[in-house]
Amino acid sequence: MRLAFAFLFSALVSAAVIHGTVYDSSLEALDKAVVSVNSTPEQRLVAVNGSYSFELAPGYYGVTASYLFNGSAYSSSHAVRISGEGDYSVDLIIFSFSLPEFDTSFEEGLLGADSLDDDYPSTPATPDDYLPVFLGVAFVVGAALAIYYSRKPRPPKTAKKAKPAGQGKTRQAFVKPKGFYPSKSQRQILDALKNSEGFTTQKKLRKDLSHLSEARVSMDLTELEEHGFVKRFRRGRGNKVKLLS
């Protein structure tokens, strides 16, 4: 009896915390996903705003995130080894679907019809309902423009100067607002992400761009992320990188 108690006490003392976030294929936090880990006994919880956390003793485990959408089940799993005390971060991404941005029918299904307000419309508005308003606005704007241009004096016509050969064509490049222009190494990183269908790991980027140092890739990714070209996500002890433009 004493040996069993001592073993249980030792397991509790050396327990580690594993935590992370569940994302959909748009890399948005997935609210109310079910996350489970195959401990003994099995642990399971509902991830509020995509976040979850478990306490585990040392060992090998599989963490699984599941989600039910439009009658279909989607899931993602990740194996993790707990070697001792500490925090272990494991993010899970369910690639099979993403939630619609503007469709509220899914949220209404979660809430239930009884929770909707009595004043809530029973049928959604259709484009035809807004047609009279749209036509009225278009008529007013068109009339105002016609009056403005009819009263505006026209400048005399001047001969157009011919542009020298080669002018007028601009080189297509990755350009973001505020005048930021990616460097040569940053454009190589963006091209490598495009070749990987817009999603890869930072480790694979360093392998594909072996002529660039690890520090160069890391600094370029930091600057590209600050200017909205890419987004990085922590996955275990590495980073996932997604192309945003």
Image (cartoon, rainbow, N blue to C red):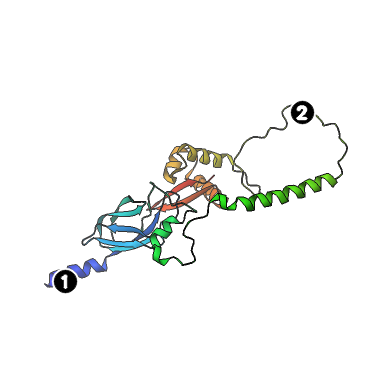
Marker disc for residue 166: none
Secondary structure category for the residue under label 2: loop
Instruction: Bin the neighbour count of mark 2 within 10 Å (Cα to Cα): few under 14, some 14-19, many 20 and up.
Output: few
Residue under circle 2? 164
How far is disc 1 from disc 2 in space, using C-alphas? Answer: 89 Å
Q: Which of the two marks, 1 or 2, is nearer to us in this view?
A: 2
Screen quadrant of the N terminus: bottom left
Q: Residue at x 16, y 71 (%)?
A: 5
Q: What type is the residue that disc 1 sits on?
A: Phe
The answer to whether residue 67 of the structure is visible from this angle is: yes
What amino acid does circle 2 point to? Pro
Answer with left or right where residue 224 lies relative to residue 197. Answer: right
Q: Are marks 1 and 2 in contact (CB under 8 Å)?
A: no
Rendered residue at 49%/61% (across/down): 121
Residue 5 circle label = 1
* SS under mark 1: helix
Residue that extends furthest to the left in the rendered view of this protein: 1
Which residue occupies the foreground of this view, 223 or 144? 144
Which residue is rendered at x = 81% and y = 45% of the image?
Answer: 149
Q: Is residue 216 left or right of residue 50?
A: right
Mark 1, Cα crowd under 10 Å, few <14 / some 14-19 / many 20+, is: few
Viewer-side residue, 218 vs 145: 145
Residue 77 picture location, percent across and down: 31, 51
Residue 12 higher or lower than 59, as above or below: below
Location of the C terminus (image quadrant): top right
Which residue is at the far top? Answer: 165
Q: Residue furthest bottom?
A: 2
Res. 50 in view: no
| Residue 43 screen position, x and y as percent | 26, 62
